[in-house]
């Protein structure tokens, strides 16, 4: 309803069929509960939630690998700082 240019809408637009794209174009970002429902139906048809879960897992694994490669030195940043930040956002829901 807020017409944000988010990851979700960008993925949906990239995966949508022409018919689904038309529904998104007509309904996305409109302050109307019925239009919001139509957008959510298209998101579900496309499987945006599953696409996000796969993306999140891939990125988190990459980040964990990079964190593991950090060489800690006295007085420098510790892996624990990055692990803490990652834990705060991983599997987060609004």
Image (cartoon, rainbow, N blue to C red):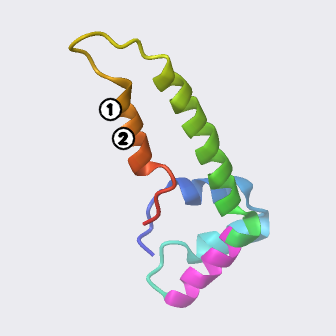
Of residues 67 and 44, the one nearer the viewer is 67
Of residues 24 and 71, the one nearer the viewer is 71
Q: Where is 64 relative to 75, above or below?
A: below
Of residues 46 and 23, the one nearer the viewer is 46
**Pointer 1 residue:** 81
Residue 47 is inside the magenta segment:
no
Q: Quadrant of residue 73?
A: top left
Q: Main secondary structure of the magenta part?
A: helix
Task: Please rate how many residues cluster around mark 2, counting C-alpha atoms within 10 Å: few if below 14, some from 14 to 19, many from 20.
Answer: few
The range drawn in magenta is 33-43
**Pointer 2 residue:** 85
Secondary structure of the residue carrying tag 2 is: helix
Which residue does the image show at 41% across and 71% down from the upper left? Answer: 2
Which residue does the image show at 65% across and 62% down from the upper left? Answer: 49
Q: Position of residue 50 (x, y in %)?
A: 70, 58
Tell me the quadrant of the picture where the C terminus can be found: bottom left
Is 65 left, or right, of 93 in this rendering? right
Which residue does the image show at 36% across and 40% down from the upper left? Answer: 84
Q: Position of residue 68 (x, y in %)?
A: 50, 22
Residue 37 is inside the magenta segment:
yes
Residue 22 visible in image: no
Is 14 left, or right, of 74 in this rendering? right
- Tell whether label 1 touches label 2 (CB within 8 Å): yes
Q: Where is 72 relative to 45, above or below?
A: above
Q: Position of residue 66 (x, y in %)?
A: 51, 23
Is 89 left, or right, of 77 in this rendering? right
């Amino acid at each position: 309803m807020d017409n944000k240019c988010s990851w979700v809408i960008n993925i949906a637009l990239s995966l949508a069929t022409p018919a689904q794209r038309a529904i998104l174009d007509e309904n996305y970002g409109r302050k109307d509960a019925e239009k919001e429902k139509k957008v959510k139906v298209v998101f579900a048809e496309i499987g945006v939630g599953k696409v996000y879960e796969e993306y999140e897992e891939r990125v988190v694994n990459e980040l964990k690998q990079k964190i593991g490669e950090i060489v800690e030195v006295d007085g420098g940043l510790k892996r624990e700082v990055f692990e803490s930040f990652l834990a705060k956002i991983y599997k987060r829901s609004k």
